[in-house]
Amino acid sequence: MFDSQSYYRVLASIVAALTTLLGSVGIFVSLTVQRRVEKLQDILEEFLDLSYHSDTNITGTIYKLIEKYQMHYLFPDTPGRTILQYINLTIGAVVLSWAAILAMGFKGFREAVGVIYLFPLLLSLGILVFYRYLLKNAIYPFGNNMMSPLIPPPVHLRSVSFLSRYVNVSVKSILRQARLRILIKNCSDKAARVILKEELSFDDYFYYMLIKGRDEPVFVSYGEVFILFRDEPVTGKPIPVAKNVNIPMGYLPGKDLTGYQEFEARFFIFPRGEKHPIEYIFSLIRQGNIILMSGEPEISVNYMVTYHIEQEKFQIIEENADIPFFRDFVRKSVLDKKRYACSHPFKPENVYECEETIYID
């Protein structure tokens, strides 16, 4: 029906045109990603600069910046799917054209060495598949490690350990914007609940909490704070940050709180990128059936404690701060995204896991 040579030339030109168009799509995606990276880096720099405003309540500003960061981070879903479908269709058409040209000119392998001729074809096919993988990761950066070093996911902006790796960031100042509070509910019941409240959700850190009444320990909790929000029910997009987060720390018998009106809570935060913890000292006071924070907490870096976190294992290098039960409980701890607690008697065998989920009110 067609002259074979003419048909081969037309088919080869179609393959060349499709490959050129595929390259043009790659250029378009790369330019889009470049502009997106520049915008995200500007937002990230603005976010990091806020760490110097420790005396100002900028919780709302940080919240809006993280939301803005996610808006620019996500590629529009419909154009992204359309581009990916076009890439799949083009690669499929190119491969089928190659197969058609080879099939029409195939005369069989006269010698085993003829198999070598297939290697360039298989290599080219592998390059096309890898090219598709690169473009897909550039369009959808969530859940892949290729783009994370270049443009960190929005959830990293609430990660204390991630932020601590930046030299010019004051983690203590950033944590001030979390507005940490400690609340003990249902003090008259058999099991009183200890809750850590965050006005702005920050996570990804190891912690140690000690609550005392008249210098008598009544509660200990330690572990890793790791928050996992569900995707938005309407859009299906991940939630990067939230307000008014409640983190259950554990339970203690209500009778252990009787006889005390005032309490002191020490809360230590151990980010992965630091070597000295950040210490909070809370003054708590009983008001009816609950125990609330009285005044603002004292926040400082405790240089009497030196630690190291390697391969998700917590190691105490030096501890001269005389923190009750600290070494007994955390010296062999593993960062496993779980929270543990203990009340009197304070022995490692009495430690239990706090399985109550983190919630928003």
Image (cartoon, rainbow, N blue to C red):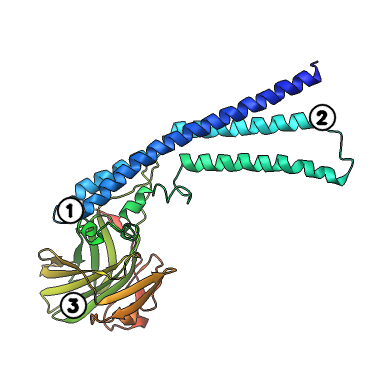
Sequence-wise, the earlier of marks 3 and 2 is: 2
On the rendered structure, is 63 left or right of 113? left
Residue at the spot x=53%, y=29% of the render? 24
Tell me if residue 234 comes above or below residue 191 in the rendering. Answer: above
Disc number for residue 53: 1
User: What residue is shown with label 3?
Assistant: 212
- The Cα–Cα distance between marks 3 and 2, rounded to whole angstroms, is 85 Å
- The Cα–Cα distance between marks 1 and 2, rounded to whole angstroms, is 72 Å
User: What residue is shown with label 2?
Assistant: 105
Helix, strand or loop for disc 3 = strand
Question: Where is residue 291 shown, x and y percent of the image?
Answer: 15, 68
On the rendered structure, is 155 left or right of 175? right
Question: Where is residue 230 shown, x and y percent of the image?
Answer: 37, 50
Evaluate whether residue 86 shows in this view: no
Question: Where is residue 158 shown, x and y percent of the image?
Answer: 31, 54
Q: Nearer the viewer, residue 183 or 331?
A: 331
Helix, strand or loop for disc 2 = helix
- Give the crowd class for mark 2: few <14, some 14-19, many >=20 residues within 10 Å: few
- The Cα–Cα distance between marks 3 and 1, rounded to whole angstroms, is 32 Å
Do the numbered discs 3 and 2 sit on residues whose CB atoms are within 8 Å?
no
Callout 3 amino acid: Lys
Q: Nearer the viewer, residue 58 or 38?
A: 38
Question: Where is residue 45 shown, x and y percent of the image?
Answer: 29, 47
Q: Quadrant of residue 168?
A: bottom left
Tell me if residue 195 comes above or below residue 4 in the rendering. Answer: below
Sequence-wise, the earlier of marks 1 and 2 is: 1
Helix, strand or loop for disc 1 = loop
Query: Which one is in front in this view, the residue at disc 3 or the one at disc 1?
Result: 1
- Give the crowd class for mark 1: few <14, some 14-19, many >=20 residues within 10 Å: some
Residue at the spot x=57%, y=27% of the render? 21
Callout 2 amino acid: Gly
